[in-house]
Image: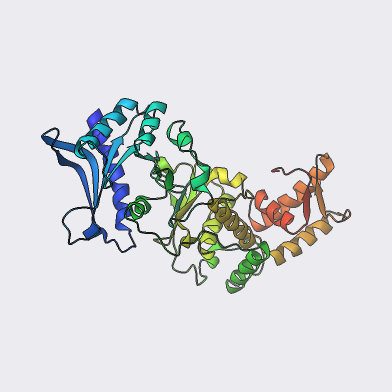
C-alpha cells in the first residue's frame, strides 16, 4: 500500500467514525439539514486566488433556511508511524489561515486527527493556535463504548493532554473510538463538540452509575434462579436465558475472532441485544460459563443505559474484584459479582460448603471457617475446599473465592490466586 492509499484509508476511517456519531444525533440539530460532511472538499482562498482542499470538512448550519454555515470544522488526517512534526501542523494552520483571511474567525474550527502522536513542538503550536486534537484508537474493536456523554468521573480533569498526544499514553478506562481534546477540555464525541460550538447543552445526562449492594445482587440472582427453576448443582445458563429480561437476547457461540478480537473472550452489544462468545485455542468450559454469565449480568443490571457494548478479556479474569472510582470499573465489578451470584447460588453454596467441610473433618477456628495464609497446611485445606466447590458448580476457583470471601467463610491473610 503506497502513502496515498494509506492516507486515504485513514481518512475513510475517520470519516466513518464521524458519520456514525453525527447520524446518532438526538438534539434539535437535524444532521440531514443542519450538518453536512465532505471528504476532500475545496474552499476558495482570495489570498491564493485558488482553492484549498481539506481532508474532511463539516459544515454546521444553525438555521437550515440560511444558506451560510455558522461553523466550519476542518479536519486534517495524519496516519504516521512516528510523531507528527511541527511542519505538518504549521502547513495545516497556513491552509486554514489563508482560508480565514489571515485571522481565525469564530466559525472556523481546525482539528488534527492522528493515529500516532505529535512532536512536543507540534503539540505546543497546536494548543497555542487553538487546533483541536483527536487520537484515533488503533483498533475498531473496543473493550467498552460509553453511549452517554456524561463526564467519566473526572476524565476532563485527570487526563493530561500532553501525556496522550505527545507521550502516547492511554488511560486505563476509556470508552471511545478516540480521545478528543479542544478548547482546553475533553470531549467524548464529535456530537458533544458540535453542541459546544453551537452553544447547545445536553440535558438530563446521568453522571452516576446506579449502585447495587452485594446483598441486593444476591437477591436479584436468587429471583432469576427461582424463575429458572434451579434446584442444585451447576447452573444451566440456557435456563437463565429464558428470563423475561433475557428472552430476546440473541446468543452466538464459538465465534472465530478477527485479528482485533484475539484477546476477547466475549462481548455484548446492547443496541442489537446480542452476545458473542469467542472460540479460543484452549477450550475452557468454566471460563466460557463465566464469560456468558458476565455479559448476561450486564443486561440484567441495565448497563445498556451507560454502554453501547462491552467486552471481556482473558486478563480481566485475574482482576474480578478490582474496583476504583471510574464508571467502567464500577460497571465491571457489579457484572462480575452478579455473575458469581448466578453461577454459585448462596443457598446451595452454604449447603454444599457445610457438607464438604464435614467430610474433610474440619473444625471452625475462631470466627473463621477457612483460614488461608502462608502455612502449607492451611493452603492445602483451602485448596481442597475451593477445588471441590469449583467442580460442583462448574466454575473457576476465582469465582468460588469471591463467593466464600463474600460470605465470610474464607479469610485470606494475603489475597492469592490458588
Residue plotted at (18% across, 53% down): 68
Q: Is residue 313 visible?
A: yes
Task: Say whether residue 181 is left or right of residue 57.
Answer: right
Counting from the top left corner in percent of width and height, residue 157 is at 51, 45
Counting from the top left corner in percent of width and height, residue 369 is at 83, 55
Q: Quadrant of residue 416?
A: top right
Of the pair 56 and 263, the residue shown nearer to us? 56
Of the pair 200 and 153, the residue shown nearer to us? 200
Whether 33 is drawn above or below 165: the answer is below
Q: Quadrant of residue 61?
A: bottom left
Residue plotted at (70% across, 57% down): 403
| Quarter in which the C terminus is drawn | top right
Whether 76 is drawn above or below 69: the answer is above
Q: Is residue 2 visible?
A: no
Counting from the top left corner in percent of width and height, residue 179 is at 42, 43
Residue plotted at (50% across, 62% down): 299
Amino acid at each position: 500500500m503506497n502513502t496515498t492509499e494509506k492516507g486515504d484509508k485513514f481518512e475513510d476511517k475517520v470519516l466513518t467514525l464521524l458519520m456514525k456519531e453525527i447520524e446518532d444525533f438526538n438534539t434539535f440539530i437535524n444532521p440531514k439539514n443542519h450538518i453536512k460532511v465532505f471528504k476532500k472538499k475545496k474552499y476558495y482562498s482570495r489570498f491564493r486566488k485558488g482553492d484549498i482542499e481539506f481532508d474532511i470538512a463539516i459544515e454546521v448550519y444553525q438555521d437550515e433556511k440560511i444558506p451560510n454555515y455558522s461553523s466550519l470544522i476542518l479536519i486534517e488526517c495524519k496516519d504516521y508511524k512516528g510523531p507528527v512534526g511541527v511542519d505538518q501542523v504549521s502547513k495545516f494552520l497556513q491552509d486554514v489561515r489563508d482560508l480565514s483571511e489571515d485571522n481565525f474567525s469564530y466559525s472556523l474550527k481546525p482539528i488534527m486527527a492522528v493515529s500516532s502522536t505529535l512532536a512536543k513542538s507540534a503539540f505546543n503550536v497546536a494548543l497555542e493556535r487553538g487546533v483541536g486534537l483527536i487520537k484515533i484508537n488503533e483498533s475498531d474493536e473496543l473493550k467498552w463504548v460509553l453511549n452517554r456523554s456524561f463526564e467519566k468521573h473526572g476524565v476532563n480533569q485527570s487526563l493530561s493532554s500532553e501525556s496522550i498526544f505527545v507521550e502516547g499514553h492511554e488511560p486505563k478506562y476509556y470508552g471511545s473510538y478516540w480521545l478528543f481534546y479542544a478548547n482546553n477540555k475533553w470531549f467524548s464525541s464529535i456530537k458533544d463538540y458540535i453542541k459546544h460550538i453551537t452553544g447547545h447543552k445536553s440535558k438530563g445526562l446521568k453522571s452516576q452509575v446506579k449502585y447495587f449492594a452485594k446483598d441486593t445482587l444476591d437477591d436479584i440472582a436468587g429471583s432469576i434462579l427461582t424463575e429458572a427453576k434451579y434446584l442444585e448443582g451447576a447452573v444451566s445458563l440456557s435456563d437463565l436465558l429464558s428470563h423475561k429480561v433475557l428472552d430476546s437476547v440473541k446468543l452466538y457461540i464459538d465465534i472465530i475472532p478477527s485479528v482485533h478480537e484475539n484477546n476477547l473472550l466475549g462481548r455484548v452489544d446492547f443496541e442489537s441485544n446480542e452476545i458473542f462468545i469467542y472460540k479460543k485455542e484452549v477450550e475452557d468450559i468454566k471460563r466460557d460459563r463465566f464469560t456468558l454469565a458476565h455479559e448476561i449480568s450486564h443486561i440484567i443490571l441495565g448497563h445498556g443505559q451507560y454502554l453501547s457494548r462491552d467486552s471481556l478479556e482473558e486478563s480481566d479474569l485475574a482482576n474480578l474484584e478490582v474496583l476504583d472510582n471510574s464508571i467502567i470499573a464500577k460497571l465491571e465489578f457489579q457484572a462480575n459479582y452478579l455473575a458469581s451470584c448466578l453461577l454459585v447460588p448462596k443457598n446451595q453454596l452454604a449447603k454444599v460448603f457445610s457438607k464438604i467441610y464435614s467430610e474433610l473433618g474440619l473444625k471452625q477456628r475462631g470466627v473463621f471457617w477457612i483460614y488461608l495464609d502462608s502455612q502449607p497446611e492451611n493452603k492445602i485445606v483451602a485448596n481442597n475446599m475451593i477445588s471441590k466447590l469449583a467442580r460442583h458448580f462448574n466454575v473457576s476457583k476465582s469465582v468460588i473465592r469471591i463467593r466464600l470471601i463474600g460470605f465470610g467463610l474464607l479469610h485470606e491473610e494475603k489475597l492469592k490466586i490458588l
